[in-house]
Amino acid sequence: MNNNKVLIIDDEPDLLKLLSITLNRMGIECDTAHNVASAKTKIDQNDYRLCLTDMRLPDGNGLTLVDYFIERQPDSPIAVITAHGNMETAIEAMKRGAFDFISKPVDLANLRAVINSALNVSTVQSHSDSKANPGLSRLIGQTPEVESLKQIILKVAKSQAPVYIKGESGTGKELVANLIHENSPRKSQPFIAINCGAIPNELMESEFFGHKKGSFTGASSDKEGLFKAADGGTLFLDEIADLPMPMQVKLLRAIQERSVRPVGSEVEIPVDVRLLSASHKNLAKLVSENLFRQDLFYRINVIEVQVPALRDRSKDIPELVSHFIKQLSNRNDIEPPKIDPKVLETLESYSFPGNIRELENIIERAITLSSGEMITVDDIFLHSAAKAQSHDTVQSQRKSQSLDEYLETIERQELLSALEQTKGNKTAAAELLGISFRAMRYKCKKHLIDD
Ligand SMILES: Nc1ncnc2c1ncn2[C@@H]1O[C@H](COP(=O)(O)OP(=O)(O)OP(=O)(O)O)[C@@H](O)[C@H]1O
């Protein structure tokens, strides 16, 4: 069977012709169909490198073809053509596994970009053994939670759909985003990660979209923004919940138009980025409180990936511990210390509010404190010591203070402890505590904790 052809399905003869001519000019041979029934027959009889289908067909819905094609030819991508503004259908198609969508009226440059990306996917897939995936070995863990996360990463890596990665602070959201990129057809292109909570509001637009020389005080030369830097690759927006409202509007526009306008410029620059985003906050709740735009949420959240908390996969702790001991010993050029089994027991019963990042910090500190040959329970200091305290101890500590005073004391202690663990790095401390950088700065000021 010939698997070099692309199947195009559309009931408008003129559009079908335009699409075929465009693809032929790109050196691609096409088969065409004008309804669901004839498309199904062709899919049954041929192997295709790519399928491109309209959504509204005379004898049925294009979504049926998305399912039909993916079931029969799972290694080839399918993209859909949707009526202008019909994002619901485009999103539904991507949720079912479609690779990308093109809106009508079809913009030929956009069409070529989608076709090129899609063909790249099929080449990458046919040349790689999906079981080998060397990139996934960086995700340590073998619990069912992690195994299913690995499967999801491999699945979503094939598509272009925006992915929203949910999970507590320090669970590995950025690692997951990076692995999606590394296993995607964009892997040879840049992966750019931005922490939305760490960019000052006034610089945000220029950081994202770039600026022209002289467009504001301090803009001494043209600057390329992060979107442009990620062109052809993946843009990862971490802590997306921290985006101020005006930037949310601008981001939505950039995603919809697939182009950006640098500050001070009249010209739109087309960009081809795959968008991944993450937050440890509950975005759906923020939407219901009008703190995050619903249309943007809808747009970035086509596929949602949940990264489990470490306490929900504590069986992975021993493997993670040996991984970090090896990694840190290598980095410091020392003989890896052994670990007292009691340490693992203690760690497995700890709640890890800072998740894997906290575990990594604990091991780093333990290696520094240990005598060198063996890490013992005395070498590990658990961040939330309060966890082990019984309710009675807490009550006796609080006795002389009002509840508010007591909570303030705890907040101050936790801030100091996080800053100590991160050697005074406020961004990292904020991450450890699961709060935004801005909230961290505010709380440090409130508690008179100096820079
Ligand atoms: N499964 C894992 N195996 C090995 N290392 C991991 C794993 N998950 C996370 N890590 C490591 O833990 C650290 C924290 O991970 P990462 O920065 O990806 O978390 P995050 O969820 O993005 O954090 P935040 O919410 O604070 O942005 C990193 O050093 C990362 O490499």
Image (cartoon, rainbow, N blue to C red):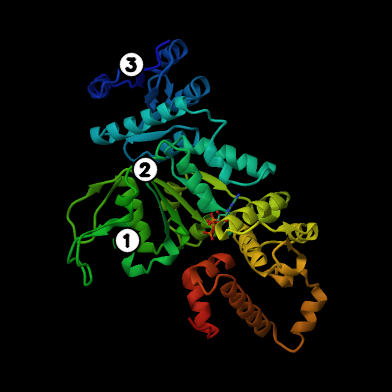
Nearest the viewer among 403 and 145 is 145
SS label for mark 3: strand
Nearest the viewer among 432 and 98 is 432
Instruction: List x then y, in percent, for residue 237.
Output: 43, 54
SS label for mark 2: loop
Viewer-nearest of discs 1 and 3 = 1
What quarter of the picture does the N terminus occupy?
A: top left
Which residue sits at x=24%, y=54%? 261
Asked whether mark 3 and ligand 1 are closer than 8 Å, the reply comes as no
Asked whether mark 1 and ligand 1 are closer than 8 Å, the reply comes as no
Could you tell whether 331 is left or right of 83 in the image?
A: right
In whole angstroms, how far apart are the C-alphas of marks 2 and 3?
32 Å
In whole angstroms, how far apart are the C-alphas of marks 1 and 3?
44 Å
Report the residue marked by disc 1.
207
Q: In the rendered structure, find residue 189 and report the number of the disc placed on it.
A: 2
Specify the quadrant of the image occupied by residue 215: bottom left
Nearest the viewer among 328 and 231 is 328
SS label for mark 1: helix
Which residue sits at x=49%, y=37%? 95
